[in-house]
Amino acid sequence: MRTLYHLWLSPPCRKVRLVLGEKKLESENHIEPAWERREAFLTMNPAGEVPVMVEPDGAIFCDGTAISEYLDEIHPTPPLNGANAVERAEVRRLVGWFDGKFNREVTGKLVGEKVAKRLMRRGYPNSDAIRAGLSNIRYHLDYIGFLAERRNWLAGDRLSLADLAAAAHISCVDYIGDVPWAHNESAKTWYARIKSRPSFRSILADLVPGLAPVESYTVLDF
Amino acid sequence: MRTLYHLWLSPPCRKVRLVLGEKKLESENHIEPAWERREAFLTMNPAGEVPVMVEPDGAIFCDGTAISEYLDEIHPTPPLNGANAVERAEVRRLVGWFDGKFNREVTGKLVGEKVAKRLMRRGYPNSDAIRAGLSNIRYHLDYIGFLAERRNWLAGDRLSLADLAAAAHISCVDYIGDVPWAHNESAKTWYARIKSRPSFRSILADLVPGLAPVESYTVLDF
């Protein structure tokens, strides 16, 4: 059996879980509190970060993007990358947008401040950062809406790693109720479509100890 | 002619320049002070970030990783990714290490504090961050040394995007003289090998206005 070491509200972990779900690949998921720096975990991934995936033959894979690209290469159905080099560049540009820019400007400032600091018992939320995150997310929702109005999915005709990366981040922020859905109807429609996919069920079932999600988190018609 | 919009001491830009150099692809390079948010530049890349590459046919590519993977796909000689899915996962794991972990723990804390803040005229260097960066880089040099002692190049037998991503970051930190080369001989030997490649020449010729590199920056026998 495939094993996935992951954490709640970790966008790279959620991205891998969504890839596994879309491809109907099974995995046994273990919560790994990476900040505890468990020795056997550091042996698997010296970066000390989740996700880490161990394949049935014992091969170890680390890094959300590396794992996602790997899974898409060896389990090509359904394809989650572009059909040619130009389309793949567009998928990867958007994956970079969400895992880079969105993560810095939104996820880190909201989930990082409100949840991660608490889980790791490292200081108190920074209210300036939270304020910035709440402002930044509107601009990002507008960009998602802009793309969703022009394309079937964010990177083009078909669902791709770009949608999964975006949804991985958005869903973490949505857990704490910080996505102002009324701000952009097209972004909301895109998220409603992806949220209703079977691959999303395990994401919606996540429960962070001591922090229940807001009520609308699991509602498909939010 | 291909055009590359880039910035000095930007690791993702340097990664793309190294890929272009290794593949002997020409480009006309323009400095883009991304923080000025030039309108025509934002039209090309709404993320407002460098690098942006415009191909001779006018096609626009953004994001250092997306561009590097694209160039490697359409110009496969020499190959800069792994030869199969498992090897590519290892290359991408290390690209993620340097563009993610190393960037957060080292480049951002040293080049970000000492140079980027000055160029953008945004506040003063944070001495706690600089101290942390100077401490963190030792651990990363040890990891580079660890890999370099066991493999011909960081991700395996051949030079790959992993080496170029690592060298892109290291070279930025080396520009300001913050790499303690005496700390790990194997890491130094790896960097000396990559620094002497023809693809590195344009990187070593970079000159940030008002900030000359330390003397050893351009020396191949440092």
Image (cartoon, coloured by chain):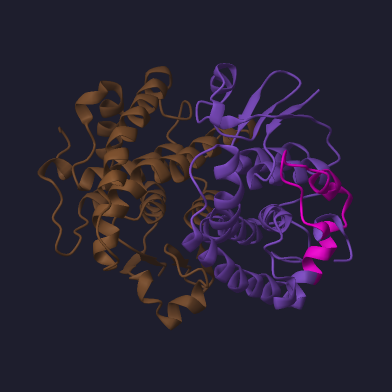
Chain colours: A purple, B brown
Determine the residue positioned at 39% across, 26% down: B143
> Would you say B139 lies left or right of B90 here?
left
Question: In this picture, which residue range is highlighted in magenta?
Answer: A189-215
Q: Is residue A182 left or right of residue A116?
A: right
With respect to residue B124, does B156 lie above or below?
above
- Picture quarter containing residue B66? bottom right
Q: Is residue A152 visible?
A: no
User: In the displayed structure, does residue A205 sit left or right of residue B102?
Assistant: right
Q: Position of residue A31 (x, y in %)?
A: 70, 30
Q: Position of residue A47 (x, y in %)?
A: 50, 31
Q: Is residue B61 magenta?
A: no
**B188, above or below B6, in the image:** above
Residue farthest to the left? B215
Quadrant of the frame with the C terminus of chain B: top left
Q: How many marks?
A: 0
Hey, which quadrant is residue A68 in on the image? top right
Q: Quadrant of the N terminus of chain B?
A: bottom left
Q: Residue furthest bottom?
A: B39
Residue under the image location 36 percent in, 60 percent down: B26
Q: Which of A176 and A136 lies nearest the eye of the viewer?
A: A176
A12 or B2, nearer to the observer:
A12
Res. B175 visible in picture: yes
The structure residue drawn at horizontal position 65% and vertical position 75%, both measured from the top left corner, is A142
- Residue A9: where, in percent of width, then height? 68, 46
Residue A148 position within the rendered picture, expressed as x and y whole percent measured from the top left: 73, 72
